[in-house]
Amino acid sequence: MPSSFQPAYRKPFEFGSVLIGADPLPGISGIWTNSGGATPVGLYQDTACTIQAAGGDPVGGWKDERTGTIIATQSDADKRPIATVVGGKMVLVSDGVDDAMVTEVDLPNPFSLAVSGAVLSSSNSQRILQSRDENRLITFNRFSNAVFLGVAVVGDTGTSPGSAPSVAVLTDAATASCFINGVDRTDNPAVSANWGRIGIMGGGQNPFEVPDGYISGLFWKTGGVWTPTERAAIEAFAVTINP
C-alpha cells in the first residue's frame, strides 16, 4: 500500500473490554460487524449506541468504532436487524420482511461505495443497499443473481442461495465501474448523478424488497474514487469478515 495512504500511526481502538487492534483500513471510511470472529464490532441495541449488542440482539445503532461516529440507526424496534453469528462471525441479519437501517452518509458524484454480505434466498428482489434519495441500489440475487445499479443490470454476483458471500464495489466517476469479488462486471457505465444518502437493506426510498440475508461491512468514499490499491484493500478485508 502506498506510504501516502498510511496514517502517521496506527492506534489500536477498544470495543468495550475487547481490543480490536490496529485500523485494518487506514484512510478508508467504513463500518463492519466483526473483526474476524464472533465478537460484534460497532453493533448496539439502541440508536444512541450505548448498549452493546450480542448475538441474537436487535440492532438499533451501528457505530464506527474508529471515530466514535454513529453511522446507521433504526428507531423502530420492530424493524431492527439482528446481530447473528454466521459461520463463526458476527453479521447483521435481515428478516427479509421489514428489517432495515438508515444512514446519513451522503455520496455526491464522484463517489465510491462497497458492501460485503450475502442473501440466503433468491425468491424475490433483494435490495442490499439503496439510495434514500434517488432509488439507486446494489442488489444481490435478484432472481438470477444479478447486481443492479438503478434499473440496469451491471453484473452477476456469482452467488446463489447457500453459496459464498460477495463484496460489491461501485466506483462512480469517469470509470463508473462495478467490481464483484475483484472482477470488473461493468455493463452499464451511465451512473452519473449523485447517489445521495445510503439506506441499508430496506432503508432506502423503495423499501419493498428487503433481503433475506446479511451484511458484514459497508465502505464509502465521499466526493472521490478509490484507487485500485484502496479497492483491493477493501476486497481483501471483506474476506476476513464475511462468513
Image (cartoon, rainbow, N blue to C red):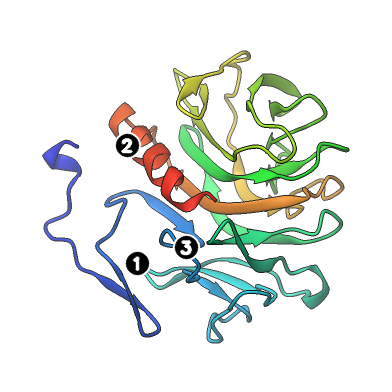
Using the numbered discs, state the Cα–Cα distance from disc 2 to disc 1 in whole angstroms: 18 Å
Residue at image location 39% in from the left, 46% down from the top: 237
Image coordinates of residue 227 in percent, x first then y, are 32, 30
Quadrant where the N terminus is found in the figure: top left
Front-most of 85 and 2? Answer: 85
- Judged left or right of residue 226, residue 197 is right
Disc 1 crowd, CA 10 A, few/some/many (<14, 14-19, 20+): some
Image height check: is 162 above or below 102? above
Using the numbered discs, state the Cα–Cα distance from disc 2 to disc 3 in whole angstroms: 20 Å
Residue hosting label 3: 34
Name the kind of residue labelled 2 in the image: Glu
Name the kind of residue labelled 1 in the image: Arg
Using the numbered discs, state the Cα–Cα distance from disc 1 to disc 3 in whole angstroms: 13 Å
Name the element at disc 2.
helix
Disc 3 crowd, CA 10 A, few/some/many (<14, 14-19, 20+): many
Mark closest to the chain's N terminus, 2 or 3:
3
Label disc, if present, on residue 230 of the rendered structure: 2
Name the kind of residue labelled 3 in the image: Asn
Disc 2 crowd, CA 10 A, few/some/many (<14, 14-19, 20+): some
Residue hosting label 1: 66
Report the mark closest to the observer, 2 or 3: 3
Front-most of 173 and 187? Answer: 187
Label disc, if present, on residue 4 of the rendered structure: none
